[in-house]
Amino acid sequence: MVLYNVTVKINNEVQEEWLQWMRQVHIPEVMATGIFLSYRITRVLSLEDADGTTYAFQYLCPDMATLHQYQVHHAPALQRSHAERYKDHFVAFRTVMEVIEEGFEKN
């Protein structure tokens, strides 16, 4: 499995509206590509910044070939839509990770 992680620092002045747009528009569009099996939204707690809030969006897909299809056929338009809507309000970077093991302990 491959984890595609998108970390975004968004200006606080648009953060609430942006997060709503991400949940209602952007993530459904990403998931509608059929590439990813699941997603997770997280907020980075260790970074306190008066200028912005940092989030990480994690998308799980079966393999690198599938992720490559997303990057070639879907990502450019989806990233452009985000950039046009929120230009000058965010910075983002992407990380690709291989899931080696996944385990859950029951408390």
Image (cartoon, rainbow, N blue to C red):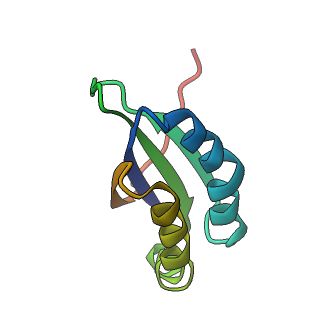
Query: Which residue is more in the foreground, 69 or 76?
Result: 76
Give the residue drawn at x 54%, y 41%.
41
Determine whether, in the image, residue 24 is placed left or right of residue 2.
right
Residue found at the far top of this picture: 107
* Image position of 52 with respect to 60: above or below: above
- Residue 92 at what x, y percent from top left? 34, 55
Q: Is residue 1 visible?
A: no
- Determine the residue positioned at 44% across, 75% down: 64
Residue 85 is left or right of residue 43, and the answer is: right
* Residue found at x 53% / y 26%: 105
Q: Quadrant of residue 28?
A: bottom right
Q: Position of residue 101 (x, y in %)?
A: 43, 49
> Is there any visible trace of residue 22 in the rendered image?
yes
Eyeballing the image, is 43 above or below 4? above
Number of marks in the image?
Answer: 0
Image point (35%, 60%), residue name: 94
Task: Please tell me in which quadrant of the rendered image residue 44 appears.
Answer: top left
Vertical placement of residue 67 versus 53, above or below: below
- In-front residue for pair 16/42: 16
Front-lying residue, 56 or 66: 56
Q: Is residue 28 left or right of residue 66?
A: right
- Residue 107 picture location, percent across and down: 57, 14
